[in-house]
Image: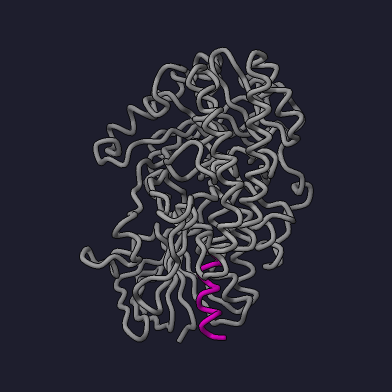
Amino acid sequence: MYDVIVIGDDLSSHVAAATACRHGLKTLLIAETGTGGLKVLDDFVFNIDPVPVTGLGADQPAGKILTELGIPLPEGCSEPLNPAYQIILPNHRLDFFSEPSGLAGEMAREFPHLKNAIIEYLSAANEAADIFTDWLDKHPQLEPRTIKEYISYLKMFPRILRFKFAAAKFDGILSRDRSLDKIWEAQQALLCTNHHDLFSFSSAFQHCASRRGVFQFPEGKQYLFNALIKKIEENKGLYLGTHRIISLSVQKMIDMEIRHKDGSLSKVTGKNLIISTKAKSLAFIRDDQRPLVASDRFRPVRIMRHPFTVFLGVASKCLPQELARHAVVVSDIDKDLYEENLIILETGLPSHGGDPVNAKTSLSATVYLENNEDKWTPDALRREGSSIPERLEWFLPFLRNNIKWFDLDKSIEISMERRQVVTPVYNIRNSFFTSFSAKNTKTRLPNVFLTGASLLADAGFDAEIISGKNSAQNILQMRN
């Protein structure tokens, strides 16, 4: 009998299980497809999830949670990337530096005629981001829950309005400059998991991601998965990877049947269940007539797009020396961003054995495809994947002649099987009473709780870590 069973392959599920274990709960984590975040293909190491790792500074909400769990950043990786990422257009390249002055200078260099307007908005966004970060730190559920929290929110409201006024003014600037507009849209596509208003209050938190810090590890996101699994096992929890759930019943107890790797079956019982919003097993307890979370009736979570990534092993010499580890390439400032007009690139560490001429590196190229069955057939994905190197030719003219490894069918297989790990683009309406799109971890079932990035979509990558702790805290509070 477990105190809590966690089902999910995503990072939030691993954080939830690690948090529960750390506080003495007998915990089982079932990751049906195994850990995600990293793949080694023909000696090339690839990140699976294109969303950059943000917010792991020691003074930031997500970073504090990892510190509480005893998970340090790897040696030599405690400093964020600088530049954090790049936005590349046919006639512009913006490096998003971690220092506000460096970013402002970069903006002024590329758009000298809009220098004052850009600096004015960045100043307002920095202030709003600090306010949002402080609120998220003190109210990790984002939505106010008590009268006292609503009073605190109302005190913050004038500052929200001040940012909204600055954002509306800047939006007018963007409407008159297509290049600058595309840069802001591309930044949102890279960092935000919610397909919403470009200038919601929470968007300032993302627009200042370069200042908060983007981190990268030699093992990619797999470092976090591995560290969390180690903590689970150190605290006497059980981790089961690549195990399939055959049945799941929720009454006073959680009863399930699972199929092990060797094909054998076993039954598991628990007092409480935490389940990822991405988990396939959620279908066992969903009811079309009664949503699990009351707000879903009025503000349902809709998946708009899934990431599709092709994985390339390339000669390092075909990539510009100034290319950042994360870059967004937009080929046409007049086209909609998602009409074959956006590619997110992530490069790996070069491997050359001391010979820079023969250095090789991994290159992940991600596009976001509609959540439409026609877009995800094998033939459609082959056409899409084959077109990506061609669409990059204007920016990387020597790419196709320097591809050392490319298995399109393998890329398709990985993108399909890792949907339970990577974060899609959601569409979630903001709450009527606040400017947040947050969802409750509690469900109508008293012993079932949700976890996942969609619950705190305003927080981008940070939501994976924070929502994991939130779901475990619900069970810990009941115990106390």
Location of the N terminus by quadrant is: bottom left
Residue 252 percent coordinates (x, y): 35, 86
**Is 445 located above or below residue 314 in the figure?**
below
Taking the spot 44% from the left edge, 54% from the top edge, the residue there is 454
Q: How many marks?
A: 0
Residue 306, x across and y down, in percent: 39, 42
Which color scheme does this rendered protein use? one colour
Whether residue 201 is situated above or below residue 449 in the rendered picture: above
- Taking the spot 47% from the left edge, 45% from the top edge, the residue there is 193
Residue 46 seen by the camera = no
Q: In the picture shown, does residue 54 fall above or below 262?
A: above
**Residue 259 appears left or right of 105:** left
Name the side, left or right, on which 74 lies relative to 223. right
Looking at the image, residue 106 sits to the left or right of residue 49; the answer is: right
Work out whether residue 152 or residue 221 is closer to the camera in this orientation and state it: 152
Main SS type for the magenta part? helix
Locate residue 179 relative to residue 228 in the image: left or right.
Answer: left
Between residue 362 and residue 445, name the one nearer to us.
Answer: 445
Residue 320 coordinates in the image, percent (x, y): 65, 20
Magenta span of residues: 468-480
Residue 477 magenta-highlighted: yes
| Point 63% across, 38% down: residue | 125
Q: Is residue 256 above or below residue 217?
A: below
In this rendering, does residue 361 appear at all? yes
Residue 385 in the magenta stretch? The answer is no
Hey, which quadrant is residue 298 in on the image?
bottom left
